[in-house]
Amino acid sequence: MRQSPSGENYTNNPTDIILVQGNANMQNGCVVPRVWTTEITKIAERGDLIVSVRAPVGEVGKTDYKFVIGRRVASIKGNEFIYQTLIRLNKNGYWKQFSSGSTFDSINSDVLKEAMFFVPKEKE
């Protein structure tokens, strides 16, 4: 998370790699390309889960694209159970207790990595 490429490398060229900067790139739980870049910093792979880590914190989406991670999102390898759990955590206000910032709410990578939730012992 938060490894955004330099703004001078942003493009409108769909042959470049997609850049996901934040919540504006997610609609109805899916990543929607808006900006591209020629600089590759950190990559999210097709099928990854995307979580906004800044303003608003906790929005979750899925991606059908390989893309560069911008400063307002984190990428997580996960399945449908993890996806639904992240949605529930957000709806229940879980991230708000860790969110900080004078201008924009945000969480750091430790908060995301240490989020705890229950996993059933039996297949449901």
Image (cartoon, rainbow, N blue to C red):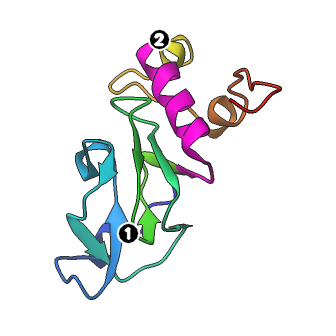
Residue 102 seen from this side? yes
Does residue 60 appear to the left or right of 103 in the view shown? right
Question: Residue at left 69%, top 22%?
Answer: 117
Q: Which residue is mark 1?
A: 6
Number of the label disc, if any, that sits on residue 92 = 2
What's the amino acid at mark 2?
Asn
| SS at circle 2 | loop
> Element type at marker 1?
loop
x and y percentages locating residue 33 in the rendered image: 25, 65
Q: Nearer the viewer, mark 2 or mark 1?
A: 2
Q: Camera-side residue: 6 or 28?
A: 28
Whether residue 20 is in magenta: the answer is: no
Would you say 70 lies left or right of 10 here?
right
Nearest to the observer: residue 53 or residue 101: 53
Name the outermost residue toward the bottom: 15
* Gap between marks 2 and 1 measured at Cα: 35 Å
Q: Is residue 83 magenta?
A: yes
The answer to whether any part of residue 99 appears in the image is no
Q: Residue at x 39, y 65 (%)?
A: 64
Q: The disc labelled 1 sits on which kind of residue?
A: Ser
Q: Residues within 10 Å of mark 1 (few under 14, many from 20)?
A: few
In the image, the segment drawn in magenta is 75-92
The percent coordinates of residue 6 (x first, y second) are 38, 69
